[in-house]
Amino acid sequence: MNASVRNSSRLAWAALRALLVLTLVTGVLYPLLVTGIAQAAFPGQADGSLVRSGGRDVGSSLIGQTWNGKGGEPAPQWFQPRPSAGDYDALASGASNLAATSPELRKEVEARKKRIADFNNVPRPDVPADAVTASASGLDPDISPAYARIQAGRVAEARHLDPAAVRALVERHTQGRIAGFLGEPAVNVLELNLALRELQD
């Protein structure tokens, strides 16, 4: 065996050993370490921020979902999320990709505004922007406090509850800006609807 073949064999064996060691370290040991730290320090978040009700998982506080009746229409007794281009299907996450200047988007927004104003029995100018525009992911779990407030009367009526109690529930579930200045105040729809169910039970 000449020197060049021996050198090539030695280099190939060194490369294979490096591949095996790096696969073990970066593909097995490091993920196990990070998963272990996450489970110890932040177990709820590491498991997907799941929300439990009645002894079972009912969703994640990080992923929106529909609150429809049997016919597929929005149920009046629940707070509704913002529109979703993928109908809150995690496999179809994404936006409609229509530009703000798109006539098709403007038509959709106007149709949604009329539908939401009629559904909540409020004037069209009271319908906030997040009620008629989908998020970039199509999985947004939060709505603005303004959108939650215009739904409070409809929800109270459908459930035969005191409107003031439902409005107070919205205020209690309004999350402020992160660190007092990042982002916008928001209301998590899943958590609000679960609190609404407890209010009536």
Image: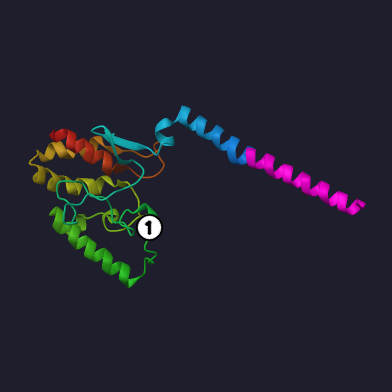
Query: Is 76 situated above or below 166?
Result: below
Give, as a three-letter code, the residue at label 1.
Ala
Tell me residue 175's x, y (percent): 32, 38
**Which residue is painted at 35% across and 51% down in the image?**
139
**Rendered image quadrant of residue 192:** top left
Q: In front here: 109 or 66?
A: 66
Disc 1 residue crowd, few under 14, some 14–19, many 20+, Cα 10 Å: some
Please tell me whether residue 3 belongs to the stretch shown in magenta: yes
The mark total stands at: 1
What range is drawn magenta here?
1-24
Which residue is the site of mark 1?
92
Give the quarter of the figure containing the C terminus: top left
Q: Residue furthest right?
A: 2
Tell me residue 162's x, y (percent): 9, 38
Query: Is residue 93 at all visible to an observer of this figure?
Result: no
- Whether residue 64 sits left or right of residue 124 in the image: it is right
Query: Is 9 situated above or below 161?
Result: below
Classified by dominant secondary structure, the portion drawn in magenta counts as helix
**Rendered image quadrant of residue 18:** top right
Tell me residue 165's x, y (percent): 14, 36
Please tell me whether residue 6 belongs to the stretch shown in magenta: yes
- Whether residue 16 sits left or right of residue 101 in the image: it is right
**Which residue is painted at 27% across and 35% down in the image?**
56
Q: In front here: 55 or 38?
A: 55
- Whether residue 194 sits left or right of residue 134 in the image: it is left
